[in-house]
Image (cartoon, rainbow, N blue to C red):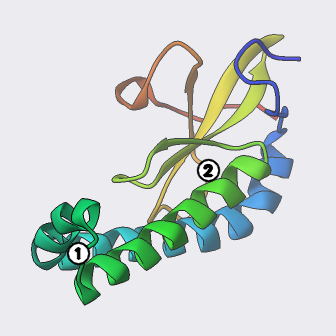
């Protein structure tokens, strides 16, 4: 198996595309939880600081609920063997192969389909359009 991560799995392009609706739903929930965390954060911060002194606030409790929701979504994606690369951007990678070497099939929240790939040691800036060598 890959040196990248023990529970990773290899995806063909067709398999990644078949899994994408599930990833999209999970990432949509992650993004919604992230937005709520950012919305509540200014009001929750004083309560979070007081929590160590048995204080707290309604906002601090609310933000904890959203963090748990975010964590569940990320965990769900990881359990599929998909890499969560950036929660803020909603960026995930599916481990695949091209010409016998490991690559990532790349998808970002808001994109309709998997349309890019990059080398495992490269990142988002090095994404390349899919071509016929990837199946």
Q: Nearer the viewer, residue 30 or 69?
A: 69
Label 1: how many residues lie within 10 Å, few (<14), some (14-19) or many (20+)? few
Query: Where 100 falls versus 134 (above or below)?
Result: above
x and y percentages locating residue 32 in the rendered image:
41, 77
Reading the chain from its start, which is encountered first: label 2 or label 1? 1
Q: Is residue 108 left or right of residue 24?
A: left
Residue drawn at x 19%, y 71% is: 41
Residue 116 shows in the view: yes
Q: Nearer the viewer, residue 22 or 34?
A: 34
x and y percentages locating residue 21 in the rendered image:
70, 69
Query: Where 91 falls versus 67 (above or below)?
Result: above
Residue drawn at x 76%, y 12% is: 3
- Which mark, residue 97? none
x and y percentages locating residue 77 in the rendered image:
68, 55
Q: Nearer the viewer, residue 42 or 112?
A: 42
**Image quadrant in which you'd find residue 56:** bottom left
x and y percentages locating residue 47 in the rendered image:
18, 73
Q: Secondary structure at mark 1?
A: loop
The residue wearing badge 2 is 114
């Amino acid at each position: 198996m890959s040196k990248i991560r023990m529970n990773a799995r290899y995806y063909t392009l067709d398999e990644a595309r078949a899994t994408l609706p599930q990833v999209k739903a999970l990432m949509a929930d992650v993004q919604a939880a992230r937005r709520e965390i950012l919305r509540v954060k200014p009001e929750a911060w004083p309560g979070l600081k007081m929590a160590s002194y048995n204080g707290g606030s309604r906002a601090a409790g609310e933000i904890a609920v959203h963090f748990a929701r975010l964590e569940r979504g990320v965990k769900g994606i990881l359990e599929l063997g998909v890499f969560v690369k950036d929660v803020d951007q909603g960026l995930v990678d599916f481990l695949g192969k091209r010409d016998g070497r490991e690559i990532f099939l790349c998808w970002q929240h808001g994109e309709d389909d998997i349309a890019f790939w990059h080398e495992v040691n490269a990142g988002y800036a090095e994404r390349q359009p899919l071509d016929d060598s990837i199946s």
